[in-house]
Image (spheres, rainbow, N blue to C red):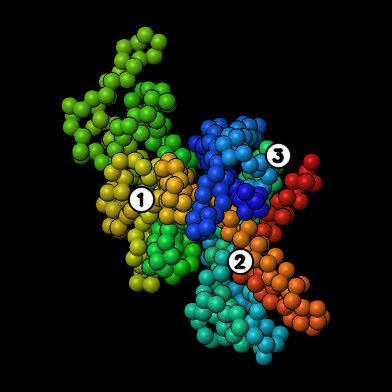
Amino acid sequence: MEDNKIAVGLDIGTTKIVAMIGRKNEYGKIEVVGIGKAKSLGVKRGVVSNITQTIQSIQQAVEEAESVSGVKIENVVVGIAGQHIRSLHHSDYITRNNPDEVIEELDIDDLVNQVHKLVMLPGEEIIHVLPQEFKVDSQADIKEPIGMYGGRLEANFHVVVGQVSSIRNIGRCVKSAGLDLSEITLEPLASAQAVLSQEEKEAGVALIDIGGGTTDLAIFKDGIIRHTAVIPFGGNVITDDIKEGCSIIEKQAELLKIKFGSAWPGENKETEIVSIPGLRGREPKEITLKNLSKIIHARVQEIIEHVYLEIKNYGHETAKGKLIAGIVLTGGGSQLKHLRQLVEYITGMDARIGFPNEHLAGDSDEALSSPSFATAVGLLMEGLEKDIKVEEIEEIVEEIINENSNEEVDKELEQKVEIKQKPKKKSFFEKFTEGLKDFLDNAE
């Protein structure tokens, strides 16, 4: 078992923290060698609210994963979410010095860097700049401008913005838990990688990841991310409503929701009753399932309407923005009975539940293909992809050294290595991660 072929995804959620260790098998599928879970006590709505508790929870999850797999965890790919994340659209252009030369990756980097200079609100920072369509001179709707001639390079960008302090707090927790950040990824993008097919992304799809504290939305069309949003409601608010509405404790409310909860109140009869033990010798409480599903229905409807408003804001009702593949629901909250039918009823769009099992090896534990592990699987995939790219580059460099001693040929091949190295367009996230590491090192 070679350590460089192993990656770790760390999902810091509101209800649970998951550390997932995995590698790719000979068929290109993910083999999970260890998983650790811990109750998340210091995170509220995707944002760290208690550093000490979060560090303890991360350490607990990591230790469990290490003991199961026998692998020592050093680097992790971490997901960020939280109500502070917002996205906006921006168009920008550069005028090239020499239009007689073909457009290179450097030109796109210049354009992306220019977008990073946008002035944000105090305390906010651009996390992600995702190019959408390019325009070269007067030719529009170009997906890949590299290799084309042109004087003016223009592009539409999907810009993701977040609170600097929230991101730094996550970085501080990971570092204090004795781990290194190898990459930071937006959680909705990680979940999308785990549960969406390329065909769905091309046709147009909205991914709704219902977590404990937040509901994340990612909209894809023509294979490109078009819209992201984080709604500050999740499964926990449903539990809170049951707790208040039925006057019971949180633990009982959560169990009620999982065992008997339904998003559709029409199916329960008035005679269906659940008895809940009273506290310390008090009389047991009797709750009708119809009342329970009414409470759940009201809150779920509110969450779906929030999400649907975001889908409308993206412009799915226009001919160009139509989401042919409809909606994919994932995350722990998507397992609520009859949720899919309610989503279809409210939005009028087709819906399915997204399971991350497509990318997992056939002999994987059935529990891992639960929608609640979608983000962790996506983060693990992200880490493994990064490793594979590094490996490819190392192989090419080795080939060059073995085959060539001629200096001119070497230079030419070095350029090829650079070109091979560049396709991953997450350059800024890597820069951001490096900047965050430097900041955390200097803070000590």
The amino acid type found where label 1 is placed reads Ile
Above or below, comparing residue 294 to residue 111 in the picture: above
Q: Write down the residue under mark 1.
A: 353
Residue 178 seen in the figure: yes
Of 310 and 443, which appears nearest the observer?
A: 443
Look at mark 2 in the image and give the residue it sits on: 424
The front one of 91 and 70 is 70
Tell me: residue 117, above or below residue 283. below
Q: Residue furthest top?
A: 281
Q: Is residue 271 above or below residue 84?
A: above
Which residue has dot 3 on it? Answer: 178
> Is tag 3's residue or tag 1's residue first in the polypeptide sequence?
3
* Left or right: 372, with 291 as reference point: right
Residue 335 in percent (x, y) is at: 36, 42
Residue drawn at (23%, 25%), measured in percent from left and top? 273
Which corner quadrant holds the C terminus?
top right
Q: Which of the two labelled residues, at mark 1 and mark 2, occupies the earlier sequence position?
A: 1
